[in-house]
Amino acid sequence: MTSLLITHPDLSFYGGAELVITELCRYLGNHGIPHDVLTRAVSDEVKMLTPKTNYITISPSWQGRWQTGTAYAFWRYLKEHPDWDVVNAHNYPTHLAAAGCSIPTVWMCNEPPSFHIHYNGVKRPVDLFKIALLTADRWMVRNRVDDIIVADEFNQQRFSKLYSRPSHIIPYGIDYAYFSSGEGKRAVESYHLEDRFVLLHVGVFSPLKNQMASVRCLKKIIRTDPSGILILAGQGGNWYEEEVRAYIRAHHLEKHVLITGHISRNTIRDLYHAAHLALFPVQSQGSWLSPFEALCAGTPVIVSPDITSSSLISMHEIGTVTRDYVQAVQTIMQNYNDYATQAERGRRWVRDNLKWEKFCRELFERCEAVVRT
């Protein structure tokens, strides 16, 4: 049977990309498929969810800009331990390490490296190194990666533009049974949300998650509806969270914005059910899963056109895709029953189409195929 090495730079925090790894490992373990995971670190939560998986952790002796130390450490390990039939690489830079070795490689491109997406030309001497990295990355992906998987048409088109080669679409799964069974009343009572119109933004504090846009939107919404409250649910503790908090203080929004910090998956599920709508003004990267998790609760969603899952949401008309968040929120508030009906249609679509079993099976089949060729 085909043996698989899954590579991911860091599993110490349980987020969306880590969820993909855990679901894949659970599938492989339940089907008796030999597999291991190579990473820098792994959390106890991830280990608990994947009891049949062996984790190999290595610590790069240096890190360097753009995680070049991690790429080198992973490459060296794979050169010294070519013990698997195929490598399934996930987040940057592990696809570079795998592509530099003799083992066939399938890259699950959750999103292209950020230095591709945000490249603005040469402005500083250090940008010359970025050009070299861009060139090396493109060459490796075009010539040494055996197969590419993306989750949606948005990513497929972006990947084709960046790398000039085709990719195969396999949409992620959503744990519909789990996210559809939340207790909104529990979150309402816990966070004192009675008689409030609740906007929910789920995600780690980051400029790319764009919490600031949600706060600015809320600032305008409460001018006409003072019952509005925005919940920012996600890990912070960084400069960007401080910037958001400073904006909240400067505009006296403390009674209208609640920052939860890192909370359990169960609490996020309850918040999806408590919210009147979920807002995802994401820029370029991440948050593919979250809008669909919200739809499992029958909660209307607003997403940026830059979020990669926007192509699916737009195609199936199960949410609002826009950059005008204030107008979108106001429209939903004024026509809530219509948008609740749309979200109910989205709930059924997620239930019927986004299944982890299907994602994992098709990904493994692609891995088997590159071994046979």
Image (cartoon, rainbow, N blue to C red):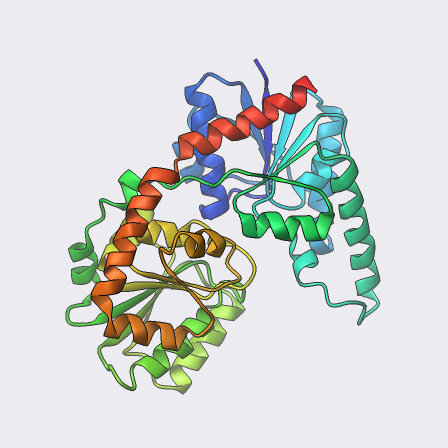
Image quadrant where one finds the C terminus? top right
The residue drawn where x is 60% and y is 47% is 156
Residue 74 pos. (x, y %): 69, 36
Query: Is residue 113 shown left or right of residue 17?
Result: right
193 over 33 or under it: above or below: below
Kindly tell me whether residue 195 is visible in this rendering. Answer: yes
Image quadrant where one finds the N terminus? top right
104 over 205 or under it: above or below: above
Query: Is residue 236 shown left or right of residue 159?
Result: left
Residue in front for this viewpoint, 235 or 179:
179
Residue 235 pos. (x, y %): 43, 58
Query: Is residue 169 shown left or right of residue 140?
Result: left
Residue 254 pos. (x, y %): 32, 79
160 over 106 or under it: above or below: below
The residue drawn where x is 84% and y is 67% is 125
The residue drawn where x is 16% and y is 61% is 189
Query: Is residue 244 shown left or right of residue 224?
Result: right
Kindly tell me whether residue 298 is visible in this rendering. Answer: no
Number of numbered markers: 0
Hey, which quadrant is residue 82 in on the image?
A: top right
Residue 363 pos. (x, y %): 53, 30
Residue in front for this viewpoint, 35 or 48:
35
The residue drawn where x is 61% and y is 32% is 88
